[in-house]
Amino acid sequence: MGCGVGKHMLVLAREGLEVYGVDLSDKAIQIARDLFKREGFQAGFVQLDIYEEKFPFPDAFFDAVISFNVLPHNRLTKIRKAIAEIARVLRRGGLLIVTLRKRIPRSRMHRSKFLDKRTYVQLEGRETGIVHYLFTKKIIHREFGKFFKIESIEVIPDKWWPKAYYLVVGKRL
């Protein structure tokens, strides 16, 4: 989910897995299709707004859903809709691997504006205009625990901050 140009998908396809990519960007989807064609692999690609649209897959279709640095890019009310759709398309016992934005010091939030207590938007830089929701472990358990047994929550870095994200692994209830 949030496949971008398909590089992570290609790693999985090379391991013999059947893969599908969903992204908001038509351009990214086209680049991913071209990459898969060049490399001789098959994949399904769908342009989709994960916060607004029902996923075009049947119930319990996937064995795993993987999403890095995508899900927290909206307000919690919209994120909840995406979580429910992920749960719908993931089979019972299926694996969820997702990264979620963790609280970071305001000094590291260069030129950002808070929209509410846990939601901010960057005013400049590479993510100008992009909304971010900041999760806590308690919120992760509350929001994902309705659908998933949380197996682990680990703190992981990005290149700008050593404790920027939670890596959450869960299994569909």
Image (spheres, rainbow, N blue to C red):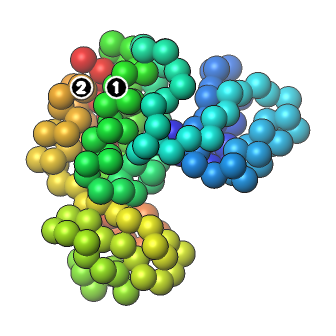
Residue 132 image label: none
Residue 147 image label: 2
Is 73 on the left-hand or right-hand side of 135? right
Question: Which of the 4 image quadrants contains residue 101?
Answer: bottom left
The one nearer the camera, 50 or 160, is 50
Is 146 on the left-hand or right-hand side of 93? left
Sequence order check, earlier mark of 2 and 1: 1
What is the three-letter code of the residue carrying label 1? Answer: Ala
Q: Residue at x 30, y 23 (%)?
A: 171
Please state the horizontal and vertical placement of residue 5, each as a whole percent of the image. Answer: 68, 49
Q: Residue at x 61, y 29 (%)?
A: 20
Determine contact: label 2, label 1, CB under 8 Å.
yes
Q: Residues within 10 Å of mark 2 (few under 14, many from 20)?
A: many
Note whether residue 101 is visible: no
Note whether residue 45 is visible: yes
The one nearer the camera, 42 or 122, is 122
Which residue position holds label 1? 87
Q: Residue at x 58, y 44 (%)?
A: 23
Q: Residue at x 11, y 47 (%)?
A: 138
Q: Residues within 10 Å of mark 1 (few under 14, many from 20)?
A: many
Is 28 on the left-hand or right-hand side of 117? right
Is 150 on the left-hand or right-hand side of 11? left
